[in-house]
Amino acid sequence: KQASLEDYEETVQKAKEAWKIWADIPAPKRGEIVRQIGDALRKKLKVLGNLVSLEMGKISIEGVGEVQEYIDICDYAVGLSRMFGGPMLPSERPGHALIEQWNPLGLVGIITAFNFPVAVYGWNNALALVCGNCTFFPLFSRIIAKVLEDNKLPGAICSLTCAGADVGAAMSKDERLDLLSFTGSTNVGNQVAVDIQKRFGKCLLELGGNNAIIVFDDADLNMVVPSVLFAAVGTAGQRCTTTRRLVINRPGNYVEPTIVTGLAHNAAIVHTETFAPILYVLKFKSEEEAFAWNNEVKQGLSSSIFTKDVGRMFRWMGPKGSDCGIVNVNIPTSGAEIGGAFGGEKHTGGGRESGSDAWKHYMRRSTW
Amino acid sequence: KQASLEDYEETVQKAKEAWKIWADIPAPKRGEIVRQIGDALRKKLKVLGNLVSLEMGKISIEGVGEVQEYIDICDYAVGLSRMFGGPMLPSERPGHALIEQWNPLGLVGIITAFNFPVAVYGWNNALALVCGNCTFFPLFSRIIAKVLEDNKLPGAICSLTCAGADVGAAMSKDERLDLLSFTGSTNVGNQVAVDIQKRFGKCLLELGGNNAIIVFDDADLNMVVPSVLFAAVGTAGQRCTTTRRLVINRPGNYVEPTIVTGLAHNAAIVHTETFAPILYVLKFKSEEEAFAWNNEVKQGLSSSIFTKDVGRMFRWMGPKGSDCGIVNVNIPTSGAEIGGAFGGEKHTGGGRESGSDAWKHYMRRSTW
Amino acid sequence: KQASLEDYEETVQKAKEAWKIWADIPAPKRGEIVRQIGDALRKKLKVLGNLVSLEMGKISIEGVGEVQEYIDICDYAVGLSRMFGGPMLPSERPGHALIEQWNPLGLVGIITAFNFPVAVYGWNNALALVCGNCTFFPLFSRIIAKVLEDNKLPGAICSLTCAGADVGAAMSKDERLDLLSFTGSTNVGNQVAVDIQKRFGKCLLELGGNNAIIVFDDADLNMVVPSVLFAAVGTAGQRCTTTRRLVINRPGNYVEPTIVTGLAHNAAIVHTETFAPILYVLKFKSEEEAFAWNNEVKQGLSSSIFTKDVGRMFRWMGPKGSDCGIVNVNIPTSGAEIGGAFGGEKHTGGGRESGSDAWKHYMRRSTW
Amino acid sequence: KQASLEDYEETVQKAKEAWKIWADIPAPKRGEIVRQIGDALRKKLKVLGNLVSLEMGKISIEGVGEVQEYIDICDYAVGLSRMFGGPMLPSERPGHALIEQWNPLGLVGIITAFNFPVAVYGWNNALALVCGNCTFFPLFSRIIAKVLEDNKLPGAICSLTCAGADVGAAMSKDERLDLLSFTGSTNVGNQVAVDIQKRFGKCLLELGGNNAIIVFDDADLNMVVPSVLFAAVGTAGQRCTTTRRLVINRPGNYVEPTIVTGLAHNAAIVHTETFAPILYVLKFKSEEEAFAWNNEVKQGLSSSIFTKDVGRMFRWMGPKGSDCGIVNVNIPTSGAEIGGAFGGEKHTGGGRESGSDAWKHYMRRSTW
């Protein structure tokens, strides 16, 4: 049963109240709660993984993998809960110091996409919690609520809002939502982001990708073939990091039926994220051309080259190389590690989730 | 003479060409150019300062101070040109590493406000340049162009666009502008930001402030009086960090005519940035109330308390304390150091300029 | 039964072999092993805590606390295993970058003191492991060995060497020990450090403390009394962070028999770490004098002031304030958090364990 | 005329007095003084460079290059003076925070080697000064003293001690020297370090190197030949980063007379730093062997491979790759940039000068 706008209103109010308690708990203690959440999920890993697999229509191993990613980010967040913080900087004024203080935002709304509902929620939930925020979201709420209860904390710290588009629209416009983390299509993401910008709110966007692998002459084909295969058809081509364009300078025969060759690099269909295991194969003449084709689509999520050349690798990473958020060498476009910052530039939205300094999305900074 | 849209078009094209050269120059060499710009300004400090003073209608010492701030940020940027960069992080995959690469954005447009035209431009210009970007802006262009010429570099690296609202609107919508740094009113800033968000562009906003000083019983009045005076009337009350609200728990007599007492803390006029040396004096009953009044305005730039109490100081900095970007203790709201991150939350726009990690605004990050 | 030099030789050789496997395991996977170690300890927390309590002669709650600290640092190290690493820095050379690479040292010897055998070992063990090192040490080895075995890893990754002074001396001189972490007395520590320096080896020293609490007039006595009491007599006065000197400007009556008053601030006995719950009370005249007395002992571990004064707090932290590694305000000298860097200056040895960048002790850095 | 021990005593006392003033000056203001020192040197760059060239017997361009490096590090230190500092970390305790405070050490002694007297002094002097320390050293003292005087600061902030071995020995043992930065031979460096360790003092060692270039089959010989030539004979082979061993798997003819072939990789002479342009050429069979030979010498300063292979590059950087402080790919062993951390492992001493976090050598850290 979906939540009404009245339900939503009540949920927000409860979460705002719960935050007053949560914000006062020291970050390492919040980390301990998150550790317990991770442990509770670990105990039910297979059951939950299969549930995800059934509901999303992906293979079981990927369902389990998603839950495992939630568990991993919980472990990561436990360590982070003793590490984040700003620097102390020298001041011009005698006997004074500049200190950068990071504080929680308050209430973080999370809207995830159908293809990775659990991992993306986990990334947001675990980091937002250790940073001192309360969050919204449906799945697993009973497991999380149990951990909170066992620690005598209000369940509203992690609220449930299984709801439709009306609540989604309300969230974009709701000033009490200190951050809205949105994963989904570029079109909806754009509307969400504009609504939030109008109220000077904060959002974290993970939108579409249109990811290319460039294979150079000097690449090791033993690495290329399985990489491209998995990257193009894994998760039924429904990852935002799925390879959708394969750029090679080498003729050959390619397996039907999911590979399309002979299109122009700038054909409209090649610039669109199809969200199916369709791979466009494009033939390039020079490194410069291959890099340019990688960059000419609107999206900027993931990108790979296969090469043995050290110099080319550094050019690929440099100011005139790939303009994506994820820039791989000799590994495919799909997949990501929680230790790195995950997300993309341009129409992919610019957000970063998971590791590195992604935690800064969930906090506000003061200089004093 | 103001630039037409044709002039603007030509300028952007030249700047985009110039960037191809600039991006290839190693960052420490770009730092050396910025050092020379700082030195060229240093040699004409007084002349330039007086020019600013005349044109903006502020006292000479403040005009000189602005130019000095440009010089200081140049010196800062020289050091930064050998320091910025992302971390190398451990990877899950054997023999692999995660590396965070920061690259220049490309072309940075800068629109500054009438009250601090030079310092704000300098902050943006110096950092954008060492990060590897080209920039737009009017003043001092001849001095900068000379330095660039002396180094056999195209002047378009720092372009001149003295223009009107039509060019401003064009800039907001121009996809070739990789970042637009806007300093000005909240109303215009909102429109600029929404236009930029629609095209998934990047902006850096420094909008209005409505800054409070809270004076507690235990404050040292020898510090409070001159601080409040300068913070309220310095620069004719036309700093974005000017103190506009004084929150005290203590009756007394206050100097006319620029101080207004007796208003409710939530009177509409008190929540508006007047941009004149008008100071509203409000009397509070408890620390909680004083902090709440500080936070209840839409703007979130600067804020101060005067107190001797260590515990109160930490509460003021904490999650339930000030929600501003600048959180001072025993110094007034006005003024800032280039070493810290300058900017504010909420309707102030969320941007950060000058020190700390403000350089990240001018770059894009890839994980590989 | 203590290990002979032959046993030691065999252990080192096995550990060196085991390292070849361990170093190839990605850091986050090493983190997963450390997580399992923490979990195995968590399951036996009370039993192990009581064992420590019996063996060391401290109260049960402190024994359990030590094991808990080992568990906590394991959780911390799991997160760290995805975070440590050096920056990528801009290079002068076109198309080039400076990268700072951190690699494991290899084999880390750990010698701990009788008073905190478990926590100190845990700090070293957990960090050394995720950083990619093998370690030596007695206690808990069976629990750790079980975790390693379950993961099909050689037990020699964490070796057992319960041994006497001859092995200790051999370790100081053994070039195959890439780091020797030594906790103990200043005298032995000095000899160990000199032996290691002779072979250009690396050590991490946590030696004696002689810690003072300074109580100012404006202190909150409700906070001072229990703090001083616990800090002076907790763990039977056998913490390296035990308060040994109490510096006040205020006459009064003090509880016998463990408090000694009337000594000169520079009496020889006051400058010696007694390792018993004896507290010397000294009366000071000025802030400057109190700070000087704090600093005049050879040791430099922990120090506290009790005051409400913001200005004094910043002077206490500044270049002319406390010269200790731990500088507290309104909390006593004893105790530490794993998130901070634990250790002291001067004759305390200069090492840092536990949080912040203490992990750097366990790695070597290359610039490329 | 060399200083006597009495002169030394007086100098130390004056420097200690001067420090009381210097430590109170805010770091960015200290940066401004260092900027002026850099500028004063810049004005006399050629004259000073030629003086160095004459006195040290190296070519003029290298003399000028040394002074330029001093100037560059001054510019770097100006930026650094607004940036260094520790993090603020989350605490377990409610309403509390862990802050890492970095303070100056006090007095830094600097002993440099004959081959790079100016650059090495400059690295130490500029960083030590902005960090808030006073320093000792001979050359350029008049230029520096003038800058200090012009700013009404005591000249003793940068003292002159042109002295012999007796003063050197006294410095090692003098507890008032908070840091001794020593560049020179491994033998003397070892004695200095042991003396300093005996008193629990701090030192920064830059000792000998024995640097290898490994040339793989797939290397670009157009890059290798000039690189090896310059690295082996530049500065008359008197750089600590001079290439002394060339490891190749490829027969050929080599230019006499400074190249020695046919020696065993472990011949005693090959393991010794000759400090002359003599290059030992060794032929290897496998990557593993080549890496092992690179690592088998006692010294651990600089090392290079020439290869096009991405995989080999990452193995070279990894835990089983080079054990040196500087690990290059496709550039020779000699040369370094001030933005990176310069120094080496093992008998090279372990110190790091110049960029990155080398500034931490000149400060002490407190956790509060």
Image (tube, coloured by chain):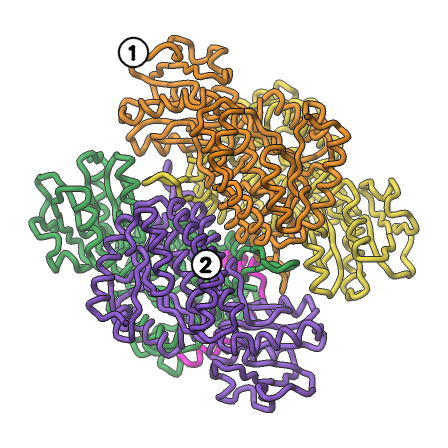
Chain colours: A orange, B yellow, C purple, D green
Taking depth in this image into account, of D187 and D194 the one nearest to the observer is D194
Which residue is pictured at 43% across the width and 52% down the height? D356
* Residue D13 lies in the magenta stretch: yes
Res. D124 in view = yes
Three-letter amino acid code at disc 1?
Asn
The residues colored magenta run D8-37
Q: Say if mark 2 contacts mark 1, CB within 8 Å.
A: no
* Residue B197 lies in the magenta stretch: no
Asked which quadrant contains residue A236, the reply is top left
Quarter of the image with the C terminus of chain B in it? top left
Kindly report which numbered mark, 2 or 1, lies closer to the viewer in this rendering: 2
Q: Secondary structure at mark 2?
A: loop
**Which residue in the structure is indicated by mark 2?**
C44
Quarter of the image with the N terminus of chain B in it? top right
Which residue is pictured at 85% across the width and 47% down the height? B278
Check the image and report above or below for A55 versus B147: above
Asked which quadrant contains residue D249, the reply is top left
**Which residue in the structure is indicated by mark 1?**
A253
